[in-house]
Each structure stands twice: as structure tokens, then as C-alpha cells.
Amino acid sequence: MSRIGVFICHCGENISATVDCERVAQEAGRLEGVEFATDYKYMCSDPGQTLIKNAIKEHHLDGVVVGSCSPRMHEATFRKTCAEAGLNPYMCEIANLREHVSWVHEKGEATTRKAIQIVTGLISKVQRNKPLNTIKVPVTKCALVIGGGIAGIQTALDIANCGQKVIMIEKSPSIGGHMSQLSETFPTLDCSQCILTPRMVEVAQHPNITLYTYAELDKLEGFVGNFKATIRLKAKSIDYSKCTGCGLCTTKCPNKKIPSEFNEGLGMRTAIYVPFPQAVPNKPVIDKEHCLYYQKGKCKICSKSCPTGAIEYDKPDEFMTIEVGAVVVTTGFNVLKTDFFPEYGYGKYKDVITGLQFERLASASWPTLGEIRRPSDGKIPQKVVFIACCGSRDPAKGIPYCSKICCMYTAKHAMLYQHKVHGGDSTVFYMDIRAGGKNYEEFVRRAIEEDHVNYVRGRVARVYEKDGKLIVKGVDTLLGAEPVEIEADMVVLATAGVASKGAEELAQKMHISYDPYHFFAEAHPKLKPVETNTAGIFLAGACQAPKDIPETVAAASGAAVKVVSLLSQENLVREPIVAVVNRCAPPLFSTCVGCFMCETICPYHAIEHEEIKDRKTGAVIKTIAKINPGLCQGCGTCVSFCRSKSIDLEGYTNEEMYTEVMALLNH
Amino acid sequence: MEKYIIKTEQIDAWLKRIIESVPRVLAPVSSGTKTEFRRIKSPEEVNNKSLTTTVSAKAAAFPPVETLFKYQKDGKDTTLTEDSFDKYPETVLWHARSCDAMGFSPLSAIFDWDYKDNIYDERRNKLTIVTFACNQSDECCFCTSVGGGPGNVEGSDIQLTMLNATDTLVEVMTEKGQKLVALLPDIFQPLSEEVDKEAVLAKIPVQFTKEEIKEHVSNAFDSPVWKRQSARCLGCGACAFVCPTCACFDIQEDAHGNHGRRLRCWDACGFSLFTQHTSGYNPRPTQATRWRQRILHKFSYMPERLGVYGCTGCGRCSRACPVDMNLQEHLISIANSNHE
Amino acid sequence: MEESNNNFEPRIIAFVCNWCTYAGADLTGTSRIKYATNVEIVRFPCTGRIDFMLLLKAFAGGADGIIVSGCHPNDCHYTSGNFHARRRWIVFRNILNFLGIDVQRIRFSWVSAAEGAKWADIVNDTVKEIRELGPYTEYKKVANYLDEEADSHE
Amino acid sequence: MNKLQERATDLLKGGTVKLIIGFEQGNNKIRPFFCEKPEDAEKLIYSDDCSTNNAVYLTKKELIGDNKIAIIATYKEIASIIQLNKENQIKKENLMVLTVDKDGDVTELTSFEEMEKFCEENTPAPDPVVAALIEKIDKMNREERWAYWKSELDKCIRCYACRAACPLCYCNRCISEVNCPQWLDPWKSTLSNIEWQINRVMHMSGRCTGCGACAKACPLDLPIGILTKKMSTDIKEMLGEGEGGNVLSTFNPNDKENFIH
Amino acid sequence: MKLGFYPGCSLQGTSREYNESVKALAPFFDIELIDIEDWNCCGATAAHSVNKDLSLALPTRILALAEKQGMKEIVVPCASCFNRLSVTQYELAEDKELKKKITDTIDMPYEGTVKILNVVQFIDQYIKDKLTEKIVKPFNYKVACYYGCLLVRPHKILKFDRVEDPTSMDELMKMIGSTPIEWGFKTECCGAGLSVSRTDLVAKLSGNIVKDAADRGAESIIVACPMCHSNLDMRRPEINKYLKEDVTVPVIYLTQAIGLAVGADPSKLGLQRHFVKVTTL
């Protein structure tokens, strides 16, 4: 027989003005299994809590129902009170007599009746409750940052500066990401390299950061605090311990006609190469696809020229397994290329380029030393057309979203062009100007007003070449939809920002969700913007959606704080409200029959396979589902889905809920 | 035993009178493809053509679920209430078959072998059974092999046999039966000359004897025959639930907070849960062991302990079985087997 | 058993999720919006946790109406519990309807934590509708058959 | 001996398989047959007239153990095997699926792709009786429907033959056997009979292959098969062709919600 | 090889040569094109701006007839007919209620199973493979392939080629020895809808197309749409007036060009019916 204590709070007069609290306590006291019932003015006050504590001790209560305000207010308070009196806190239930009764009903018999009913329901539930203990999960004190762009750099530095270890992996030979390709940054027009390079170096030198470039995530297992990541270290063909980064090899390499990724194909590189002068690490890798040795079997000129003998051919990719407590995904974005826009002639006409290519043209370093020269003949274009929203906001192109950064960088490009080509003429075709951000609108106005960039509101239908000119056919919607034709020397397309290549595959490896455009999905668009649905995996930057640099950096710092707050704990303490798969005696072991149809229902991928083995022979007798308590968040969807009722949710078990419902109905 | 002749066409008039006089009359009523014993309000409802009902007549005295007692808790006090026996109505079971009537004897043997089950006894005592001798049979029938027969009167209070298109023989075995005759005495003519009842009965060949089966199975506990025979058994409860002699029941609580009742409900030995212990251990872990139990119980344990066999050869289990676990076929094979 | 609909007070059980509708109902309280007393709330972590059997059991236990409410689509605290629940209800409602069980007596709704007023409306609306439909006698009759009939074998 | 019997003899003689689950002639009907000895192979027949779906035996460990077995399969069995596989209940390496064409030739379906293809090509025509009954019930008003089902399901004796006959009802513990809480009254009563059918149909949603074994197993011939049939049709209409079988463990953000206020 | 064939009105009137050339081409590849019996107007440009149901019912009837006559695929050379038939099939597949309404209207069973092929798809599927071996006289010219709009838009429904920069005709022309030019007018509007009412606009729009093709050295413009053809060909006097120059580049159907390449009799291809003489070829 249970010994339940019932405590009805008046909440001053908040409850007692409409509910006859004394009667509620009396009626509750008459119920089977109720050992003690009383009412009190302020149950949450010190004397109120003391009353509960004393009653627990005096009457040896094994369960408590407090009729008071909403559990969202004081459930934690009263559970703590119970715990202090030695009662398991999960043996305490709150009947919501204020928000759900006294504040929404008039004084009267029906109102008091309802209060009694609610208390009755919870008395029955608490009789079925089981004592639960918080779940403790040990934490591996190290974070994995995937992607070495500005988001990854910022995250890694912030975590490392808090004294936690970080492992960063970057798939290309150098960290830096897209930001390292940019010329100047809006809205300040400060040099991108100038602000980024010091941070790249800091990453490389930070004692708490281990950097692996040319490395990719191969596999991720485990759960929050306890991930096991397998990293593929792609063979660089260079022994970095010997390489001094002198660069001699790169000057000797005979294959010099490889379009440089860093320069977006506007410049060339060799097969053994450092992607850009400020690369971190500043040591070369061999691009096997273009290396004569790898392709044809002979050459080895680099090896001959290397003063330290650092070249090592034919080494396979290596795999490394690391244990980390948290993962931050900062894999960034891509811009649309290829012939996605045949009507604009990209790929067909050399002088139709993307915004990112323009960044390289405007960059003070490669490939034109900061002079705007068009790719076809190296001439300085006198008339440039910038087309915004190339792909973005165009459901027909499969990209209904706004790429967010294009308005600003297009204004920046036009401005840079006007600054560099005096007397040049620039036109921007746009849909809307979205310049929300600190100093952003002012920046665009400056382009228009001070630098006299010609802004035309309208779409471009087609770009074609005629007599050495690019004919841009568009429309000016502000002038009554007049067709506009501009003969341009160069056209710059503000192509949409899209999810980075392989994002979908990566998401599947990590079991995080992604949106229809393969951008990774945050756990909550507003309140959990850097978390994913998988506990312990965080996001920052443009892998989530197109973002500009300030936003990316802010998100990166946010993600870093989340990681640090996770790693700073010895153990993760979790509410024990998790699902469990039942176990029973042999020969059944569990009523779970292992259909695993629950696997797809769990938003957290918390359902794992557990093999039940014969103790002697080790043969697998049965494979059943097992809920990983580190991953389970306690939604209980699997519980009501399971046909054989083999899963139950602690704190909201089938029996507890069934009993509560039946007791509410006095059935 | 009194014997009468009644004009077949007058039977309905008699039944009508019985319905008017007796609180409950159960008779085979067809709905859809099946015929079952149902409470009737008029003779027209009866399906006179039906050979047997799907479910046997045992529910007339042993319902699928019945209340043993009710309880009410108030604080620390508990009040128990038993149903008044007045709740069980006087009942006439109309148009049953010999095999139905025969089934009540093993039932009574089980319910009364040491402790007298008042509830069962009361229902059984209030039951008057009017059987119709069978002039047809089907391939599942094997009453003659287990000591019964199409015109067997054991357990019947009255048996009717249609002699020809116009006349029906009425055999009254008991006082209860006589009471029914007395409801409309004018239509019964005393039997003037002996009639050949056997001639009109269905011919059901004897395939084996129950004693033979008993002898075979009593020593066959470890025989592989059980596994072989039960291989296709799906483990449902159809055979037990339709059987006229299966009396296994489960005690269940219909509990609702402070009140509830204790119930007796049909159970079936074919269910895997039937003998499962709380620990998870099951002494009859396979369908083969459950099938063995079924046969041994009916043909070995019951005759040994209660002196009565648990089978009337009605063939209901065979008809109900979704996978054609034909009892007669299996019994023949047991009878013909050497001890394995 | 038969109650006249005028003074019939329906008993309605509300199955709600903790994060949206329970909080929404709290807001109704803090906003002091009044509604009918006929509804009692059972709190679940998520609509995904609400077993369809509990709904049937509520009817069997004597409820005249049921409210099931959770987070709006895309707002689920657990991201997809409400989507799974919605599917379950789609199938469940169809089966009930085919069996002739009165699905009008089950009100499904999405009430967010900000929709205190909507919660009051839903409750009042449901109470009104159930009052018009009357007590769910036919279901209760089946549920209490051992009381109702002298002998089940009829 | 026909080709099937020859093949069976070979398989058993050669020890390729320990057991062949097939069909034999029973008492006026075709019934499942477990052929373990080559000399029994001549009893094997091929028929799609058996009311039992023999795939039901594939999840019975006590019968098949860890042995390699063969099943002589019709559309019904194959459709169930495909679904059982999706639910991790089939050890493909221990199962040989044989089917017989109209010329008596025996074909082994070695992959699930082949089985899917077989099912696509051999989908039986819908049962007009079932369709007519569904239509009739659909046309009733709610009260009539309730009266209909109440009277039909009142007859149910809870023998669970419907469950036993269903290849996809393979749970170690059925919800009807759960007693904490006692979701379903374990005795015959109209309410729990109805609740049992609701559970059965809900649990079958998206999984049911429509073999009709449940209805054929019912000793009382209750129209329970139309419940699963109706459910399958409704699901297809409302939720489209689900992937992986179970519509209730997946969702589409655009699922209809016209009933949600 | 037998295939269903829907000529439509244009191919019986202004574009007889298109019909003739498709039909002339077929025997070279052992294809028999069978007209849908009792076919009706597809409603083309007019119906859908007047009455939506009518604009769907007309093509549905055609497709229903094809189904009834056991056709699995039908060849629809007219781009406008192709467009209307495809759009109708799509809309009815998307909307069950609409399908019911329309099939009730035409009072014929309709499943929507017939595959609709435009002329390029037809050639791609049934002619392309054997084309190279059949060429007797390569069509060795510089050509401008002009697709117009009806063949490719709306892409969501037609799913044919690349909507902004189609290349399928260019590929075929390359196969028969031509050199297609790179140009920006492949899918520009010819003014079709205003063909009769605003010839001045047609002159302007079609003029720009013809001019660019000519300027880039095209010796002929290849089309697969009767509307395109009549605007670029029949309206040439107006065009030339607008352009203030005499552009003589002929406009010929894809099927005519291929027909010439495989050695069909030019008169059977209807080349004599053009307004802009094709003598230069």
C-alpha cells in the first residue's frame, strides 16, 4: 500500500478564491493509498516546504502530490524539497490548480470538483511512479571541428582559449575557406586576408588545437560526450615532418597549367602546390590527378629538387580514430557554377564570371595583382554588368531561398570596380536590395550615390555575345518594364550560395538532419540556432544557410560556448526521462522482437541494436532495440509506436499514464 | 424413458409454447455463413437444417466470461458481493446435438470433481437440453469412435428424431424433459409400436475406440508424434473455444480503482501464455508440448482421474481449425501407430 | 443513464504536449481567460507519446469527448513527434470512423504556447459540441456490458 | 513425380535444406505441409488455394531453428517475406524461396528484387466480395456502422486465430498479452473485441500485404479482413505509397491535416 | 514499327510541309505513323485563355481516343499541340477531381497513359540511332537552331531539354553534317500569339531573331514549330521592312533538313511551299 502525501496550496488567494482547497485536501485524504493530506497558504514558501519535508519524514511518505501552480513554475522547487527530505524527486507530481483551474474558472462546485479530479488522477499516477535517478554520462574533453573556414577557425580558437582541446579537420590543403579568397569585405572594405591570416596562424600554433588538413570525416559513432570519429587523412605525398615549406618543388613542377581552385580557375597552379601564399600549413601537397608521376609513372622532378627528401609517393590514405565529446560542423557553402545559367552564358563566354571570381580579380595578390582585367583578353573592362539573384529566390532553379550575402557583395564589387577603374561604367540588375545589417544600407547607398553605380531593378533575360560585346538583355521595372539592352565588357553573376558538396553525405554520416537544399538543420530556428537534433553536434556558419562573415563569426562563438559548457562538465547530468526497452527473463530476454521499425521514428537516432548472446557460446540469440540514454531526449514517440509495448518512457510510463487517465474518470 | 410421436409440423407450436414459458431459449440461429446458439424469441429464428453450430453449447452453463463476485473498497473496508443465483435464468437448449449433450458430462466432472462449483452447477441445473438426433453428418464427425452416436441420448433431457416427412420420435429421458412435454401435452401421441430409430440416423463409421487411443497416448509422452502432428498448428485458441468439453479457464480481475470484480473467462491450452510462469519460464515451451497436453488431457488424464473422456467426437475443433488440424485424422494415426 | 442534454455536463479529457499546448493552457490561466470546467488535462511530453489506446480507454472510462493537442507543425520540441502523431491520427480516425465510432468526439488541434486564447476557444467549442452530441451512451453501454446484461450469452 | 516434387526430393536428399514448407491436400482443403524427408516429397502440391499464408511459419523459431529451409511460395507468401525482411525477421541466407509457374516449372527467387518483381507481375485482382462489403459499409451512416460492427464483433470469441494466422503478427508478446497496464480486457467482451481489432489494424497499417489470412482463419467468419483492406486503401489514398512499409514510423511534413483545428 | 500520330490543325493548313516532311521521313526508318481517328482540335492558343475546362477537355478527348485506339505513344509534331496535350495530361494527373470532371465532360474513359512525343523526342527515340548510316547527302550548312517557347516551356511539365539553352536540335543537326551556330535567340519569343493581330510586333520580335541568325552567318534557320515557322517565314516581308534590309535566310523544319540528308525527294518534303525560297540549299 502506498503512502502518498497530498499538499494543496492556496497560493495566497490565487487558488483558494475559487477552489475550496480545504475540501480538495479532505477528499484527497479519503482516497486509497493517501496517508496525509493538507492545505496551506503558500506551499512554495519556506514554511510550506518545511511542512512537506516534515510530513514526508513523519508519515514515511513514498509519494507526493502538490496541488499548486503550474509544474512549469514550481515542479523543480517541490521535487527539490522532496529530495531534501529523502524522497526520490520523481515521486513528486504537481497538480496544476492555478493556471488550469482557479484562474480559468469561476468559484463554484464544478471548479472544486475539477480540482479534486485532477489531484485524484495524479495520486493514482504517483502510486505507479518509480524512483528515477539522473543519468550521468562521462564527457571526453575534446572537440572536433569539421571545416577550417572562418567559422571553424573562430570556433576552434574560442574553444581552445577556454582551455579545451580541439581537433580541426579541413578537407583541402589549407585552412582559410572562402574568406581567404575574398578581396575586401563589406561594409568596411578592409582586406579579408589581413584580418583572417593572423587567425589562421593562431590556429596552427595554438597548443590546444591539433590541425589536420587534407582530412575528412569518415565515420562518426557514439553520442554526446562520447563520440568516436574516424578521420581519413588523405595522402599528401609529402612528409610534413621533413618539409620546410621552401617551395622549391612547386617551381620545378613541369605541369603548370592546372586551374587554381583558390583563384577560381582564373590563375594556374602546379601539380605539387600550396594553394595560396598565405596557406596554413604553408607546405605543399601533390594533386595526384594532375601529377605526371601518378598519372604516367615517371617524372619525380619534385623529389629530385627537394632539399630535405620530404617527398613520399604512393603512400595510402591513413585512417585515424579519435574520441571527442562534441562536434562542430563548419563546412561552409559553395557558389553555383557550371552552366546552371545557360541563358547568361556562363561557361560559354569567358567574360561572364561569378562573384567569387570577381573577388579574385579584385584581390591585391593573385592573379591580376588587384587590377580588374577581364579573363578573355586581359583588357580592363569599361562596362561591367552585375546580375544579382542568379539562381536565388527562383523556385524554377530549385533555389527558392535568398542567398543573403549577394546584395552586399554585389554592391561591394561594383564599388571596388568603380574605385579601380576610373571612368568605368557599372550596372547592377537586382530584384530587391536586402541590406539589413549594421552599416549595410549605408554601404549600398554609397555605391549608388558616391560611386555612381547604376542600379536597375529588373531581371536579366539573356546574355549573349555579339561583335565582341556581351549583350545583356534585361528589363527595368521601375521604368514601366522597359526592355534594357546593355553592351558590356564583362558580366558578373551573383550566383546563389548552395550547400557545400557532399553535405548530404556528411549529414548522414553524423545523423544530423538537413533541409531540402542540403543545408544542415538547426535544432530550433530561433532558440537553438547552433545546435542540431543530435545532442553534442553543433553547427556554425554557412553550412546552415548562406551567412555573411559577422553572422558566421557570431554563430561560431555561440557554438564554441555550447561546446565549452558541455566539455567543462565531468559528467553530463541528464533528466532520467528517457525511453527504455524492457528486459525480462530468458528465453525471451525482452519482449522486443527486433523489427526496428522504431528506428526511423526517433528524431535523435537514439535507437541502437543490441545483440543478446549466449553466455557460454557467444552465439547471438536475439537482436533487440536499445535506447541510448545519452541521445534520447524523452519525447516518447517510439513508446506509443511500439506494437508490443516493449519500450516505455520513464516518468510517463504506459502504466502511469493509463492509470492517470482512468483515475481522472473515476473508472 | 417415455417415448412419443409428434407431428413434425407441430414442433414449432411446441417450441413457441416453450419460449413463452421459459425465460431463456437458446437455439441454432444463422447469421452470415455461420450458425450459433442464440437466445430466440420465436421458432422462425431457428435454423433446423444446421448440423452443428461453430461454437458448442457449453456456454449455456459455462459462459465465456462470468462474474464470480464484485468488490467495493471504501477507505480500509472492502465489501464483497456475489451475484444472486436468480440472475441465472431457467434455460432450454433447443436443437442441440447428441455430441453437445454428451459434453456436459465431462464439464460437470471437471467442475465438481472435488469442490462443487456452485455457479456452474446452478447454471447446469437450470438447463434443459433438447437434442435432435442427426440424420446427416460431415467428414469431421467421429462421435461413434468415442462412444457417442448420432442418436445417443446421454445428457439429453429430450431427444427428437425425425422418422419421416411427417412424424418425429420424441424420447423423454428426464423429469425436466417431461416438464417441457407437459407444456403442450396434446400434441404428443404415445408410441404405439417400436420404431427403427437407427434406420434414419446418419451413418458414422467407427474408426477407433477411445480406449485404444488412451492406451496409445498414455505411453507416448516422449513420442515424436506430437511435434509432427502439431507442426502446422498456429497456436490460436479456436479448437478449445469451440470444444464442448474444454473447461480451462482463467481468473481475471476487472479492477477499476476502488471497485471491480473477479471474472472467470475461457482460456485455451494452445496459447503460448497458457502455462507461462511469471518468471518467464514455460513448462510447455513449444506448440508440440501444448498439442500433447491437449490430446493427453482429453484421452488420458481425464479418463484416469475423472472417469470420463474429454471428447464427444463433434468435430468442431477440426472445422474451426485454420490449418486443418483434423483431430479425427490425428487420432486415427495414433490408433494405427505402433508405440513410437 | 439517459441524461437530458440541457443539464448534461460532458466529461472531456485533454491529452496535450508539455511544450506547446500545456504551456498555452498555462497562458490562458495567466491571462485569466475563463472557460468551461468540463475538461481535465493530462500532460504528455509530446503528442508523439500519446498512445491511441489511451483515447479509446478514455471513452471506455466514460469520457464523452476528447481533446488532443500539441505543437503546430514544425514547432515540435522534439522536431517531429507531432508529425508522427498526425499520421497516427489520420489512420486512427479513419479506422474509428469505419467502425462507426464517433470521431466528432475527438478534437484534434495545434495550440502553441502563445495561444492562450485559442486554448479557451477550443475547450469551449468542444464542450459546446459534445453537449449537443449528448453523452456517449452507446460506447459506455458496450464498455459496461457486464453490468448491463444479466448474461453475456445471448 | 512432378517437377516440384523432384526438386524437393533433390533438395532434401542433397541436404541443401532441412525442411520444405509447402502445401498438401488436406480434408477437403489445401493445407500447409512440412516436408522433411525426401520420401514425403510426393505429397507436395502447388496451389494458391490454401487459406493459410505459409510465411507465418518463418518466424517460428521452434519450427525452423537455425536450419536452412525452403518455402514453396505463392504471391501471398512472397509479399509477406518481403515485408518480414524489411522488419528484420528473415535470415535470407537460411531461406530458399521457390515458386511454381503455370507450367509446373519451379523457379527460385534468389533476391528481394526478384521477389518484388514477382509480386508486381502477379498481383491478384482485388476480391470483389470484400470491395462490395466495404462499399456497403461506407454507405451506411455512422450509427448503422456502429450497429453493424457491434453485432459482428460481439460474436468474436477471442481465439486470436486472426493473429495466429498473420505472418506479420510475430511479436513475442502481443499487446493483448500486456497486463501492466491491461490495455485490452483479456476476456471476450464487445468492447475489448472492438479494441482488439482496432489495435490489430493500427499495428498492420502500412505493413499489411492484404493476403486475407486473418479473415480466412476466423472460425466465425467475421468480416475482419475488410478492416485491414479498408485501412490499406485509405492509407494509400491519404498518405501515398509509404516507403519501407510502415507508414506510422515515417511522416511527410505535408500530410493532410484538415481535421486538426 | 507503328506509332500514333496527331497532326493537329496547323499541319493540315499553314504547315502542310511540316506534316509532309514528317510523313516522308518515317518510311526511311520503317516507321508507320497512324493518325488518331476522329481527332479534334487541341484548342491550342485560344481555348486556354477563354475557358479552362474546354482547353482541357479538347486535348483529353484526343488522348482518350489514342488510348481507345490502343496507342502507347503518339507523335505530335506541332509544338503548340504538344504543349497543350502535355499540359492537360499533367493537370489531370495532378488533380483527381479535375480528372473526373473532364472525363465526365467528354464521357470517355481516360487513364493518362499515352506517352506524348514532340518531333525532336520522336527523332531521338526512333531515328537517331540509325540516322548516321542513312545519310546520303550531308546537310553541310551553317544553321541556327531555333526552338521557340512551346517546345520547352513550362519545363516542370514538359521536362524536355534544357529550358533556357536547349541543345537537342543542335545535336541532331550536327549528326547530319551541319554546323549549328552559338547564338542567344534559341528560345526568344517570335510573337506567335500576336501572329495575326499585331504583325508589327511580330516583325520586330521575329526580325531580331532572323537578323541575329543571319548576322552570325547562318545559312538556314531550323525550327520544329509551325508558329515559329510561319512567323519567321511568312512574315518575312514585314520583317525585312522592319529591319530595313533584305534578309533571305530560309526557315526550314528539322524534318525537312533530315529528309534532305537521307535523300528524300525535296518536293515530298514540301520545300516548295515556303515563302522564303530555299533554292540556295
Image (cartoon, coloured by chain):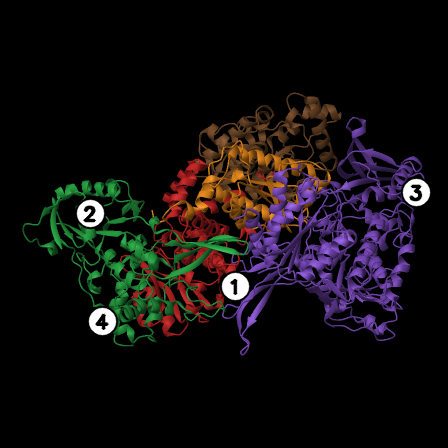
Chain colours: A purple, B green, C orange, D red, E brown
Question: What residue does disc 3 label?
Answer: A421
Chain letter for the residue marked with disc 3 in the picture: A
Nearest the camera: B176 or A192?
A: B176
Left/right of residue E67 with respect to residue A376 in the rendered view: left
CA–CA distance in space, label 4 to label 3: 115 Å
Dot in front, 1 or 3: 1
Q: Find disc 1 in the rendering and name its residue.
A: A591
The chain carrying label 1 is A
Q: Position of residue A269 (x, y in %)?
A: 83, 60
Residue A606, quarter of the rendered image: bottom right
Distance between the alpha carbons at the discs numbered 2 and 4: 39 Å
Q: Which residue is mark 4?
A: B212
Q: Are marks 2 and 4 in contact (CB under 8 Å)?
A: no
In depth, the one of A477 and D139 nearer the eye is D139
> On the same chain: label 3 and label 2?
no
Q: CA distance from mark 3 to mark 2?
A: 121 Å
Q: Is residue A52 rendered to the left or right of residue B318?
A: right
Spatial CA distance of label 2 from label 1 is: 55 Å
